[in-house]
Image (tube, coloured by chain):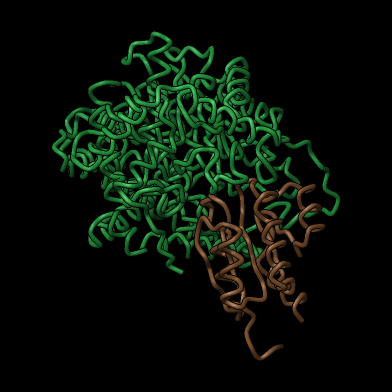
Amino acid sequence: MADKPLRVLVGKIGLDGHDRGAKVVAQALRDAGMEVIYTGLRQTPEQIVETALQEDVQVIGLSILSGAHMQLIPPIVEMLREQDSSDIIVVVGGIIPREDITYLKEHGVAEVFTPGSSTEDIIGFIKRKLN
Amino acid sequence: MYDNENKEMLYEAKKAWLEKLNKVKEKHPERKTFKLESDLELEGVYDLLDMENYDYMDKLNWPGEYPYTRGIQPTMYRGRLWTMRQYAGFGSAEETNERFRYLLDQGQTGLSVAFDLPTQIGYDSDHPLARGEVGKVGVAIDSLADMEILMDKIPLDQVSTSMTINSPAAVLLAMYMAVAEKQGIPMDQINGTIQNDILKEYVARGTYIFPPRESMRLIVDIFAYAGENIPTWNTISISGYHIREAGSTAVQEVAFTLSNAIAYVEAAIKAGMDVDMFAPRLSFFFNAHSNFFEEIAKFRAARRIWARLMKERFKAKNPRSLMLRFHTQTAGSTLTAQQPDINIMRVAFQALSAVLGGTQSLHTNSRDEALALPSEHSVLLALRTQQVIGYEIGATDTVDPLGGSYFVETLTDHIEQEVWSYIDKIDEIGGAVEAIENGFIQKEIQSSAYRYQKEVESAEHIVVGVNKFTTSSEQPIDLLKMDPATSQRQVERLKEVRLRRNQGKVAESLQELRRAAQGSDNLMPYILTAVKAYATLGEICGVLRDVFGEYQQQINF
């Protein structure tokens, strides 16, 4: 295990107000020893990237249940690339149809967790990816 | 009912039975301890002794009688079934109008409008923050022109329409009134509900715009205006649904909802209104979750607590002020993406609990909602589920069929007690607004949500298809496909509306709204004038944002 704790940004993008999943995941990551920066609601892609760079995180966890994921998530990956920060991994949780999952993963999202995923799985995934 | 001698016999008999029970348990231990989310450990069986000294008249009485535990009408579903009301809306006003007319043709009896997020947060479809959201979780409504299309060929004096709209509720209500007026319908003949419950938006649902105090003013303005102009309209639907979806327990759902309700009643009284003027038009909205008997008891307890609150605390005299009327929706958060067809069964049991709990209207979720917005086929199945409950299985033949059940009455009493103790706690904090501002309610919900997640992950709580009886071969189902061109078309229509209208009238109406917002006039007439001039939702809310400011979410995390 690394000495320094992992730093993770957990954010709600778009106008969606359903933050139960984001908060539960944030708390679980924190309980697993990670440092979590929770952004709260109504973040734009630009705000997410800005906060992620400022806070020097290794992981961005985005929660979205409104269906706007196809418009809001690819720009985040794109902006990270432009800022030479493609090493930050982006994971997504929410109501995401199967074919959109395929698209998002082809466009730089590391993993998508749909309803019913366990926080253990999410923690395990992040640790595997970064070790 | 039992004299002392018979009571003795009963005690003796129970003692003997318990001895037998313990022997059985020694040989065949029970699978686990059985408890509710709110920590009540359940007995294996309940009996007459649990209802010793039970005061029937005080706690139950007959249906339609105070404290309305058994239902708000004497005949309940023997007179008329609940309103079958499926929440629907997506894409453009045309597409949603088509879905509405389909549902009405299939025997649905009321409409329920889902608006997209930009509409709910008071942004026009071309606002930068509306990116990707137009027409997604509901229909996009930018101006009266969209509302005219949404309600096209739907006779507004014959359907009742529920609108899930909160911060901009006054604007959407004004649009609806304007359409009814164009259809030539007198204002006392339109029926429906606006959600208009801002307090739960700060803790659970997130579509707030203005700070609490200004939001409360808008709500009280609507109470006062509607009382005089649209007397049969339900001016608020005080909602526990989203509090529960955010992870609360059943007890917290009722407690926080009723605490919010107390805040609205107090605000209206403080503004000089007589309680019996507005209380009969208050309505409620609850969640039907998975623990079948706990949910039934929850609905019954909520009715009893509300009746007592209104009578004893607020001295309401009109019986209608004391009756808790509520809409129910099955629990979206219990739907699973895994083996989605299982959701059909979950929804059916949840819906049955709402009916046995005496709901006035019901939305059943569709099986595919953990994956996407529901397809037409899935929505039809969900509606048919209600029709089976209503017409086939006999559940509606007797009023409050579980009334008097030792178990259900014990649960009802338990939930009532727990809710009162939360209400006392929130009173001590200084009321719901304070308890939201200091983060108490958010923290309570968050800790229940986290605990539930842990219980699912440790398989202490079983979710079929998720942590037991899983399968690796998932059958894909057909999902609703959104038309990607909808957003563009919506923006074009908005531009056209902005071009076509009388600009002078729009500017003047917005200027007058601004002045009124800065003062203390009731804002409804000003909003109605602006709406009729085709001022857009974003323009109207923009003026109010300028005057009232915007709420900044505090992150209690």
Expressed as whole percent of the image width and height from the top left, the position of residue B106 reads 62, 17
Image check: B27 left or right of B69? right
Residue at figure coordinates x 51%, y 59% from the top left: B35
The answer, for residue A30, to whether it is visible in the render is yes
Toward the viewer: B504 or B145?
A: B504
The answer, for residue B23, to whether it is visible in the render is no
Asked if B269 appears above or below B424 in the picture, the reply is above
Residue B366 sits in quarter: top right
Expressed as whole percent of the image width and height from the top left, the position of residue B16 reads 48, 57
Image check: A126 left or right of A5? right
Quadrant containing the N terminus of chain B is: top left
Expressed as whole percent of the image width and height from the top left, the position of residue B131 reads 59, 46
Asked if B60 appears above or below B470 in the picture, the reply is above
Residue at figure coordinates x 58%, y 49% from the top left: B333
Expressed as whole percent of the image width and height from the top left, the position of residue B367 reads 68, 38
Asked if B365 appears above or below B47 in the picture, the reply is above
Residue that lies at the very extreme toward the bottom in this rendered image: A3
Toward the viewer: B309 or B159?
A: B159
Residue that lies at the very extreme toward the top in this rendered image: B184
Image check: A121 left or right of B92? right
Residue that lies at the very extreme toward the right in this rendered image: B473
Determine the colour of chain A: brown
Toward the viewer: B364 or B25?
A: B364
Image check: B115 left or right of B384? left
Residue at figure coordinates x 61%, y 27% from the top left: B383
* Count of residue discs: 0
User: Which chain gets the green colouring?
Assistant: B
